[in-house]
Image: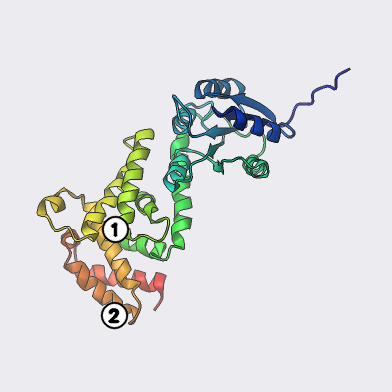
Amino acid sequence: MPAEHVPKPYTLLAIDDDPQSLIVLSKTLTTEYEVLLAKNSERGLALARSASPDLIILDILMPEMDGFQVLSELKSQPATAAIPVIFLTSRSSVEDERLGLLLGAADYIAKPISPPVVLARVAAQLGYRDKPLHRPQPAAEPSAGSDMRDGFVSALALQLAGHPLIRLEALLDTLAILLDSGVAQSDPAALRGAACLALMGLNPPGGGLGEALPRSRMLIEEILGHADPEDPLLNLAWKLTHADALLKGDSDPATLDRLPVSAHLFALALNYHLSLLQPGGALEQRHAQAMGQMQRQPGFAHCASPEALSAALLNSSQTFLGR
C-alpha cells in the first residue's frame, strides 16, 4: 500500500521556459516543499492566482511576457501582490537587479542554478514571517509597489551610506536646507527617497556623480514604464537627476531655463558637499570655499538669505562631519 502523502508546510511556484531549469528546481525543492511548475508566463500567472503559493521563483528572460512584466502583473492584483518573488536570471546587470527589486522582487538567484543557494534563499524568504505568508491587501492600503519602492529606497540608503564619494546623511541635510530656502513647501521624506533614487547610479563606486546621474535617470525612466507614471517620488527623483547638466558646467541659457528648480538645488548640494569632503584645511575653511563656489552658480538665485543659509549649512556640516 503506497505511503500516504504528507502535505508540506509551504507551496512554491517555479516559472521558467527552460525545461532543464524546472527539472533542477523540482529536484532541489520537492524534498522540503510542495512545488508547482509552469513553463510559460501565462501558465505561471494562472497558477499563482489559483494555487496562491507561498513563494514564486521567476525567470527574467522568457518569451511573450518577461519576468519584469509577470512581476508587475502579480503586484497589480491584491490576491498575488504580497507573494514573495525570487528572480532567477542569467543576467548580472546591476540595473536589472535594481529594477526587479523596485518592482517588488524579494531576491535574486543567478544561473546556472546551485541547489544549496536555491534552498538557502528560499528558506531565508520563508523565514521572514509565519504562515500564512501573504494576505490579500485591502484597496485602501498602500500598494505593494509603493511599499517595495520605499523598501528599495531604504536599501539604497544603506548602500550609499558607505560610499566613498558622499556622506549620505550630510548630503541629504544639505539638500533639505537648500530646498527649504528655495521652495516654500517641501516633503523631507519624499526628498530623502528621491535623492537616494537619483544617486543609485553611484554603484559601482568607480564613477563620478556626473556619470551616475544619467545612469539613474535612464533607470528611473524604465521603472516609470512599469510602475505608476504619476508616482511623485519617482518623478521628483527623475528631476533631481538632471543636475548632471549643471555638474558638467553646461551654461547654455536654454538648458538652464528648462531645468527644474529641484535639479538646480541638487546640483548646489552636491557641489557643496563634494567641496567639504576635499582634504586639507579646517571644516570652516572648506565651508567658506564651498559657499563661495555656490554663490557663483546659476542655481543660487533660487536661494534666499545667504547669511542664514551659510550658518545653517555650517551647523549641519559640523554635526555630520565633525570639526
The residue under the point 61% across, 30% down is 20
Say how the picture is coloured.
rainbow
The residue under the point 40% across, 65% down is 167
Count of labels in the image: 2
Q: Which residue is mark 1?
A: 210
Label 2 packing within 10 angstroms: few (<14), some (14-19), many (20+): few
Q: Are marks 2 and 1 in contact (CB under 8 Å)?
A: no
Q: Is residue 242 above or below residue 170?
A: above
The residue under the point 75% across, 33% down is 31
> Which residue, as the protein is rendered here, is positioned at the far left?
253
Looking at the rendered structure, which numbered label has been put on residue 285?
Answer: 2
- Name the kind of residue labelled 1 in the image: Gly
**Gap between marks 2 and 1 measured at Cα:** 25 Å
Nearer to the camera, 261 or 27: 27
Which of marks 1 and 2 precedes in the sequence?
A: 1
Quadrant for the C terminus, please.
bottom left
Nearer to the camera, 145 or 11: 11
Q: Secondary structure at mark 1?
A: helix
Nearer to the camera, 260 or 30: 30
Quadrant for the N terminus, please.
top right
Q: Position of residue 233 (x, y in %)?
A: 35, 44
Q: Position of residue 71 (x, y in %)?
A: 48, 32
Q: Is residue 100 left or right of residue 271?
A: right
Nearer to the camera, 172 or 113: 113
Q: Position of residue 41 (x, y in %)?
A: 50, 24
Res. 163 image quadrant: bottom left
The residue under the point 24% across, 60% down is 247
Q: Is residue 133 left or right of residue 258?
A: right
- Name the kind of residue labelled 2 in the image: Gln
**Which marked residue is nearer to the observer: mark 2 or mark 1?**
1
Looking at the rendered structure, which numbered label has been put on residue 84?
Answer: none
Q: Position of residue 65 (x, y in %)?
A: 45, 26
